[in-house]
Each structure stands twice: as C-alpha cells, then as structure tokens.
Image (cartoon, grey):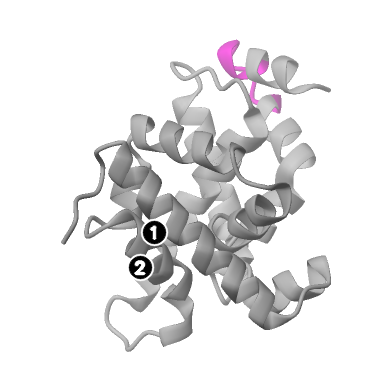
Amino acid sequence: MDDRQIVKKFFDRDESAIEDTKKAYEGYCKSIANNILSDPRDGEECVNDALFAAWNSIPPNEPENLKAYIGKLTREKALDIFRKNNAQKRMDDNALIPFDELEEAVGENTVEDSVTSSELSRIISDFLLSQKEAERKVFVRRYWYCDSVSDICKRYGYGQSKVLMMLKRTRDKLAEHLKKEGYLYEK
C-alpha cells in the first residue's frame, strides 16, 4: 500500500491507517526513537505516541511525504519523552551533544523551536540540497537521526576525524547561510 492510500484512510477515519503506517514505518520510527532514548520500551511508547499524533493530525494536515511526517512526529515525541525522563535527574552529557552542536550553527533559540518554523526548515532543506551528497548524508544522520559519530563512521567507512571535520564545516556553512538569509546575526 502506498502513502497516498494510507493518507486517504486517515482522511476517511479508517483505523486501519494506523496499522498500515505502523507496518510501513515502524522500523524507521524505532530507529529514530532509539537513537534519542536509551530504553527500548520508551522507544516503543514513542512510536505509539507518534502514530496517535498522526491519527489526530491527519486531517487537517495532508502530508506529501508520510515517511518524513511520521518521522518528524516520532522525533518530537522522543524528545518529549527524553525531557520528561531527565527533568529531575542529571542528564548524560553525551545525550544532547547533537543538539548542542547544531545550536552553535542556528543560534541561541533552541533547535526544537527554530526547526518548527516552516520558513527556517525550508531554508535549511535548501541549504542541505546544495551540499555534496556525502556531507548532506553525514549531517542528516547526526542531526536528524541522532546517530553517534562512531555509527556514522561505520555506516560510511570514514574515520572519526573526517566525520567530525565534515560536521564542523557543514555547521559553519549553515551558520553563514543563515546569516545571509537573516536568521542569524553577528555576535
């Protein structure tokens, strides 16, 4: 079943849309959730919450790309669960490193707040599309999927210093691009 048919089921309020979405994208969503959360049970809860959020948001939303849409919902839910689980206890410093790194490029607003802006999202997407494929893939793996640097090295066969340099250069170029677009100002 293709995404258009699944989205149509959501619009028809056919509950099988949830199961069809789960069947098509559960592995993808679990990968996103488990890269952010340390407990697989939290990852499972996150995927279920994302499916419920899809049910509640389609309609009125009509995603052109259901995979990206459910991935975004999963990521948002995983971040919510992460914050809730770590609100009262000392957090693992490594857990938020991807967000800290990216905040250096996008400025003082939190990454989550900034990325919710559709205009900023479009600008970042356009920027990434203008980058070489290797840099784009490494950037997306780190900052969308929250893959560790070592996982990225294994995935693409790069050394750690190469991945770290690619990420730094891409973040720097993104910061310059955002300055040109009026989203960042010189400090």
Q: At 37% from the left edge and 84% from the top edge, which residue is drawn? A: 91
> Quick check: is 115 in the magenta stretch?
no
Q: Which residues are magenta?
A: 9-16
- Residue 52, label in figure: none
How far apart are labels 2 and 1 at the CA level? 5 Å
35 left or right of 159 in image: left
Residue 89: quarter of image: bottom left
Relative height, residue 3 to residue 172 (above, below):
above
Say what amino acid the circle numbered 2 marks.
Answer: Arg
Kindly identify the amino acid type of the residue bearing the numbered disc 1.
Answer: Asp
**Is residue 92 at all visible to an observer of this figure?**
no
10 Å neighbourhood of mark 2: few (<14), some, or many (≥20)? few
Q: How many marks?
A: 2
- Residue that label 1 marks: 80
**Toward the viewer: 118 or 132?**
132
Identify the residue at horizontal 50%, vertical 40% (top origin): 127
Secondary structure beneath label 2: helix
- Residue that label 2 marks: 83
Q: Is residue 177 left or right of residue 114?
A: right
**Image location (x, y in percent) of residue 90:** 32, 89
The residue that appears at 23% across and 55% down in the rendered structure is 109
| Quadrant containing the N terminus in the rendered view | top right
